[in-house]
Image (tube, helix red, strand yellow):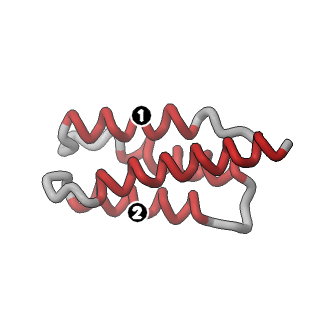
Amino acid sequence: MVAKVEDREAKIKMAMMMLMAIINDTSVPRNIRRACTEAIKHLQNPTLSYGVRAANAISVLDEISQDPNMPPYARTRIWNVVTLLETVRD
């Protein structure tokens, strides 16, 4: 049980680090960086379970991943974050 909680926390921390890399990349459009910031806020919400946090963040990232102005490498990074978060379950 404890190992599962630590595993979920580790995955969420890794996802937040990956999102921070996108936020700190000035070549990524501002609206995409803003969505990544919003996804991080969802991941940090202590009132929700890990699965709900991940689902909320995925929702935000899925929506923004369709943006035609997004550089291809940023889209790939976001898909990597979504793939990681999809493994987080309650």
Question: Which quadrant of the figure has residue 81?
Answer: top left
Q: Amino acid at mark 1?
A: Asn
Element marked by disc 2: helix
Q: Nearer the viewer, residue 17 or 62?
A: 17
- In the picture of the structure, the residue carrying the numbered disc 1 is 80
Q: Position of residue 30 (x, y in %)?
A: 23, 61
Q: Position of residue 88 (x, y in %)?
A: 65, 39
21 relative position to 88: left or right? left
Q: Nearer the viewer, residue 70 or 89?
A: 89
Residue at 47%, 54% (x, y): give it: 16
> The N terminus lies in which quarter of the figure?
top right
Mark pair 2, 1: CA separation: 16 Å
23 relative position to 46: left or right? left
Indicate which disc, 2 or 1, sits on the residue closer to the N terminus: 2
Q: Amino acid at mark 2?
A: Thr
Q: Residues within 10 Å of mark 2 (few under 14, many from 20)?
A: some
85 relative position to 61: left or right? right
Residue 24: assigned label = none
Residue at 19%, 52% (x, y): give it: 28
- Residue 11 higher or lower than 46, as above or below: above
Q: Nearer the viewer, residue 64 or 87?
A: 87
29 relative position to 77: left or right? left
- In the picture of the structure, the residue carrying the numbered disc 2 is 37
Q: Position of residue 80 (x, y in %)?
A: 41, 34
- Residue 5 higher or lower than 48, as above or below: above
Question: Which quadrant of the figure has residue 76?
Answer: top left
Q: Position of residue 50 (x, y in %)?
A: 70, 51
Element marked by disc 1: helix
Which residue of the protein is positioned furthest toward the left in this rendering?
27
- Residue 66 higher or lower than 27, as above or below: above
Residue at 76%, 40% (x, y): give it: 4
Q: How many marks?
A: 2
